[in-house]
Image: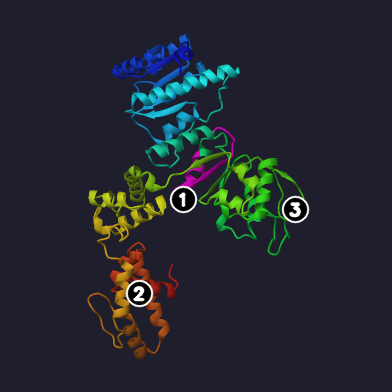
Amino acid sequence: MSREASNSLKVLIVDDEDALRYSLKRALSNRSFNIFEADSGEVAIEVAQKEMPNIVLLDNRMKGMNGIEALQHLRGICPAAKIIIMTAFTTTQTTIEAMKFGAFDYIMKPFDLSKILSLVDAAANVIKETSKDGQSEKQDNAVIEEDLKVGIIGNAAAMQEVYKMIGQVAPTDVTVLVTGESGTGKELIARAIHKNSLRASQPFVAVNCSAIPENLIESELFGHEKGSFTGASQQRIGYFEQCDRGTIFLDEIGDMPLAAQTKILRALQEGEIQRVGGTEVIKVDVRILAATNKSMETMVKENTFREDLYYRLNVVRILMPALRQRKQDIPLLINFMLQNLAKKNRSVANTVAKEALDLLVEYNWPGNVRELENIIHRSAVLAQGNTILPKDLPSEINPKVPSESSSETTKIDEEPISTTAQSTDSEVDFEALYNGLCELTGNKDILKKLEAELIKQALEGTNGVVAKAAKVLGMTASTLKKRISEYEIQ
């Protein structure tokens, strides 16, 4: 931005560190701004009331009033100001709140001066263009004051962008399409948007479109009238009516049949639905959020997804990054998962050895966060102490650990089936024992019930961990799995 364009703009620097304020003031002096300083949120409010700054560089963690609180006051004093939050201590909540309450951007300390200067220049350019068009910004006073616990973990740059987008779109009613690979946590994004929206006190309904049979999806979404089809013994209220004035999240929307897509489009455009078998037009006020792991553009080209619905859904798109693209978040995620496990079961491991953590970070995670959660749960249960060691990890993570399936297959293939009752150090030959007892008692049902009961007790005593239960019973996990299936044990 030219010196002439920025000459009349006022910049307020708010930070309790004298050295940082000095550095920023010196760097910005080359832009010919009128610069003001404040060492606290309270002082910033006083300065803003007198000077009405155009741009504010605002630290988040200060003595007394914090940055988010100061941001809300400043938005009331100078609603058109571009406020850039600066902090060394970021969380999911603070990033979302900052954007929700109208921050222009959010930057992590320590930062390069060139980056903060670029943000200031961008803010100045927006002010210049806004002034040229004769427009004025409106302050949104209807914000929800509540604790935002969204359950999203991560400090990676890609996640910071996601938090910013959530904060920007949440207070609006805009339709959002969340994309990303399976297992990345797309539903968490939808829930975070709802919790930060003006609909937060209203229902949130999550629907997995791929899990509903094609012949039932319209009934599930829009309801049906009594007698409208075989089995419709009474009227049913669908998900859209259930979350009137709230938010509906359509997960895996790429799997939705074309017939249902037409009705979704009508609900989006007209705010109207009809129950299956009904003639009444029902008005609904529902915000639609959707998610998919498929390429919607490809589906539109292949005529498997309606183009007009795609454009209605894709107003704002949020891309959830794959776990391999934010590996620095893996230790944070693991810590969060272990804490949750410890709350439910104190006997599981609650820490990870450095060698094991290195292996977990190096892995490519094709199943993303869902796969990480599964493996951490498994490893925490199988660990013999309070710490997950490399040996507790599965073979796909630690190549030095033999594959359970391959070792069991070898045993089954190589060991001949014995015809007499015998036992070894590694496994009791239940097949031979069973046959021998049958000859003695002549009652197969009693023996089956006895074995089933022993298996149930072993599973209960090991919290359902098949590998541990098999060890207790003196059989391989493969044999135990067959018995569980045969006896239909849950």
Which residue is at 32% across, 70% downward? 406
Q: Residue 456, percent across and down?
A: 38, 70
Tag 1's secondary structure?
loop
Disc assigned to residue 279: none
Amino acid type of the residue tagged 2 in the rendering = Thr
Above-or-below relation of 63 to 248: above
Chosen colour scheme: rainbow
**Residue bearing the label numbered 1:** 181
Label 1: how many Cα within 10 Å (few below 14, some 14–19, many 20+): some
Query: Was residue 216 drawn as part of the magenta stretch in this picture?
Result: no
Of 425 and 264, which appears nearest the observer?
Answer: 264
Distance of label 3 from label 2 (alpha carbons): 54 Å
Cβ atoms under marks 3 and 1 closer than 8 Å: no
Question: Of the residues under marks 3 and 2, which one precedes in the sequence?
Answer: 3
Question: Of the residues under marks 3 and 1, which one precedes in the sequence?
Answer: 1
User: Can residue 59 be seen here?
Assistant: no
Amino acid type of the residue tagged 1 in the rendering = Glu
**Residue bearing the label numbered 3:** 278
Amino acid type of the residue tagged 3 in the rendering = Gly
Distance of label 3 from label 1 (alpha carbons): 38 Å
Which residue is at 38% across, 45% downward? 325
Query: Was residue 175 drawn as part of the magenta stretch in this picture?
Result: yes
Q: Give the range drawn in magenta.
A: 171-192
